[in-house]
Amino acid sequence: MALIVQKYGGTSMGNATRIKNVAKRVKRWHDNGNQLVVVVSAMSGETNRLIGLAREITNNPDPREYDQMVCTGEQVSIALLAMALKDLGLEAVSFTGSQVAITTDSAHTKARIQTIDDKKLRAVLDAGKVAIVAGFQGVDEFGNVTTLGRGGSDTTGVAIAAALKADECQIYTDVDGVYTTDPRVTSKAKKLDKITFEEMLEMASLGSKVLQIRSVEFAGKYKVPVRVLSSFDEGTDGKFDDEFRKTVGTLITIDEGDDMEKAVISGIAFNRDEAKIALLGVPDRPGIASAILSPIGNANIEVDMIIQNISENGVTDFSFTVPRGDFDKAMQILNEQVKDDIGATDIIGTSDVVKVSIVGVGMRSHAGVASKMFQTLASENINLQMISTSEIKVSVLIKEEHLEKAVKSLHTAFGLDREDGESKVAGL
Ligand code: ASP
Ligand code: MG
């Protein structure tokens, strides 16, 4: 018997039939002797619909009132799922975030969880019932409802699993696990049985959309085993037992370092949301990077990759990337507030770029990983505009038109291709 937290996303909760299917699934896990806490998202499209409503009223909604409204999608979901479970003869009790109590700070629209009171959930479980909890929401010390940022139900699931010391947190999605790369880009993408928290965090930060980044941070910090799996999986002969549980989906876990066979690279991530800006002919002296990037930071624009060359004649070029949505604003700030001040000769930019990254903890113990990446891309005639590295990843910025070729060639070069031809990802 295990204590399992299951989180179902908007697609799994998409309509009445699907909610009934989730209920059947929960019941089968329960029938196999497991204790269950189920965290749910709003029905698919519902959160966007609510945000749209707010926008019809104002371009600048008050953050407290925004949270008060946008959290309602999840409240509908918990009640519907509880009804569906009762219909199947299984007792279930639904809770909003504040009823649990999941307390957060007061940073509306992106609040962070501070504490979770497990008393009510434990009482429900001890009585043999299923507890259902609204994802994405909490309550601050003043009793205001808060939300955790888009995709925040993942974090609710992991945080509850941490608070209850659950055996695992299962995140149900419309794919059957975490893939080596996006199967829409290469049909040779392969489902991973296991990935470390660190790798998953890099993959999520670099553009893989399987899990909310914060949920992975949380899982790593509290060592909660997280399993990503599909709500379409059928179980072993229809049985959802421990044996089935241990083989299905992708387990995100600590690096046990025992996997001698493990590939050096676990996955390839990419992000189209990049734009590149270069300031030409800037003086090479102390304070220049700060003079360029401070006004950008003050405008809340996140800077990602940065390069500055050394110079022989006292002037150099300084380049960096920003999210595409902030490109125009960044260009305007630089032209109006920075260019003349620092004496740059020109500012040029393009959003015709993407970032492609290889990720793997195996990099720590293997030399030559970056050069293999560069060689592979060179043999495809792909020019590298920027490079950045960390302990377990190498990222390059390339022209967008080369994205598919880059991902496919790297996937093959690092031995990630599935052997048996076509991808079998559900829904693709
Ligand atoms: N319903 C929220 C959203 O759409 C939270 C979630 O689905 O995780 O972002
Ligand atoms: Mg999600």
Image: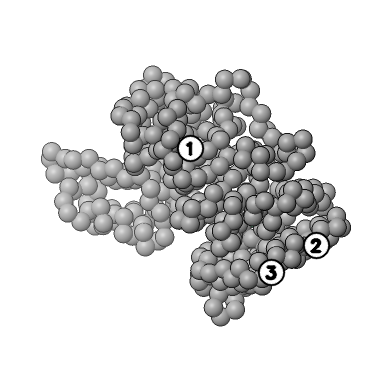
Give the residue number, with chain letter if any, for mark 3.
Answer: 123
Give the residue number, with chain letter if any, for mark 1.
Answer: 269
Q: Where on the picture, by quarter, is residue 3?
A: bottom right
**Residue visible at 56% across and 24% down in the picture:** 418
Residue type of the residue flagged with mark 2: Glu
Residue type of the residue flagged with mark 1: Ala
Gap between marks 1 and 3 measured at Cα: 42 Å
In which quadrant will I find the C terminus? top right
Q: Is residue 164 above or below residue 99?
A: above
**In front of the other: label 1 or label 2?**
2
Disc 2: residue Cβ within 8 A of ligand 1's nearest atom: no
Which label was assigned to residue 108? none
Looking at this view, is 426 or 346 the one in front?
426
Secondary structure of the residue carrying tag 1 is: strand
Q: Earlier in the sequence, mark 1 or mark 2?
A: 2
Q: Earlier in the sequence, mark 1 or mark 3?
A: 3
Disc 3: residue Cβ within 8 A of ligand 1's nearest atom: no
In this rendering, position of residue 247 left or right of residue 334: right
Q: Residue 407, image x and y in percent? A: 48, 29
Residue type of the residue flagged with mark 3: Ala
Gap between marks 2 and 3 measured at Cα: 13 Å
Q: Where on the picture, by quarter, is residue 55?
A: bottom right
Which label was assigned to residue 91? 2
Residue neighbourhood size for the residue with mark 2, other residues' Cα within 10 Å, grouped as few (<14), some (14–19), many (≥20) = some
Q: Earlier in the sequence, mark 2 or mark 3?
A: 2
In this rendering, position of residue 394 left or right of residue 65: left
Tell which residue pokes out farthest to the bottom in this image: 142
Gap between marks 1 and 2 measured at Cα: 42 Å
Q: Residue 389, image x and y in percent? A: 33, 40
